[in-house]
Amino acid sequence: MGFPGIYVTGNVVVDTLVRPADSLPEWGSTTYVDSISMRLGGNASGAACAAALMGVPTRIAGMVGDDAPGAYARARLEECGVDVERLSAHRNEPTAATVGLVHSGGERLFFHVSGASGAFSLADISFDPELIEGCKFFHYGSVFCLPAMRNHAAELLSRARGAGLITSLDTDWDTDGQWAELFDPLCGLVDYLFVNRQEGERLTGSSEPQAIARHFRERGSGSVIVKGGAAGCRVFTDGGDFSSPAFDVPVVDTTGAGDCFCGGFLAGLSRGFDLQSSARLANAVAAHSIQAVGNTDGLVPFDAVSDWIIRQT
């Protein structure tokens, strides 16, 4: 059975993850760690890989460098089943890169360079009918992570809606500090808004899920999904709200778990799940992500996730 597709855009990154890094050593010293590894990262990559592994046709629009890390990112996306036709390679900019310090408890600290993702612009995203054929959803990984797109997000979301797609957006961290000034005008163009509590507090002034959701819904957003990490998620819609608990699993690395959550949630909707079942699937996908180092390395296909969910009940 075929399912409606998901068209994803955002940054595509190659992460170098250092684990464990429980404190910052003094300058000039050497610290031995358990692992330093290269992994696929980026908000678009995580969401796209998660959705594709859930059996949903998924296409990605993004930019990497014409370099070895870019080739690695492309190969990993294809391995997960993502259509990379619209993943372009910049000749002069390197693939976006992050060095992540991962605490033994799973939390992380990032150092990031935008590289080719910084050059990715509105002109690089097409909504031609033949490209989006079969797609139902358009997911924008983050308005804050694509520098050349920051001031064109409204146009992008409007174009997606004009093409007949249901829009979703994840918040992510704004290193430029504009937060609500940039984000609030977009709310009326988003059908499904994903936000974690830390980012929600920066955007709304409150860390309470109800207040966060009310802020966005009063400004026109459709369903608001507040991600709470170990607390699971809270979903707010026209018909009310509900909580979906997280799964209790060992935490190795939280890098990209929120991105994978978004891909899992949208995959659930694409497969015809209701909101509660989509939230449970999203929590299960995120639970697999955090049990391995890296954004996508812990992910498994839909049938394996479904069987795993059954065993947890």
Image: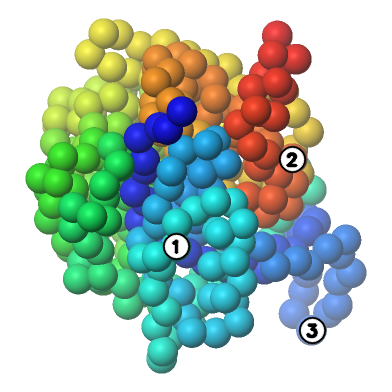
Q: Is residue 164 above or below residue 294?
A: above
Q: Nearer the viewer, residue 192 or 273?
A: 273
> Which amino acid is tagged 2?
Gln
Residue 86 image point, x, y percent:
36, 65
Number of other residues with Cα within 10 Å of mark 2, as a class: few under 14, some 14 to 19, many 20 or more: some
Q: Residue at x 54, y 25 (%)?
A: 281
Secondary structure category for the residue under label 1: strand
The number of discs equals: 3
Residue 260 image point, x, y percent:
53, 42
Residue 102 image point, x, y percent:
71, 55
Q: Quadrant of the C terminus?
A: top right
Q: How is the image coloured?
A: rainbow
Q: Quadrant of residue 70?
A: bottom right
Number of other residues with Cα within 10 Å of mark 1, as a class: few under 14, some 14 to 19, many 20 or more: some
> Which amino acid is tagged 1?
Val
Q: Nearer the viewer, residue 46 or 257?
A: 46
Looking at the image, tell me whether mark 1 or mark 3 is earlier in sequence order: 3
Q: Residue at x 18, y 48 (%)?
A: 160
Q: Label 2 belongs to which residue?
A: 291
Q: Label 1 belongs to which residue?
A: 84
199 vs 294, left or right, is left
Looking at the image, tell me whether mark 2 or mark 3 is earlier in sequence order: 3
Q: Label 3 belongs to which residue?
A: 28
> Which amino acid is tagged 3?
Gly
The answer to whether mark 2 and mark 3 are in CB contact below 8 A is no
Q: Residue at x 22, y 26 (%)?
A: 222
Q: Is residue 73 visible?
A: yes
Residue 283 image point, x, y percent:
57, 27
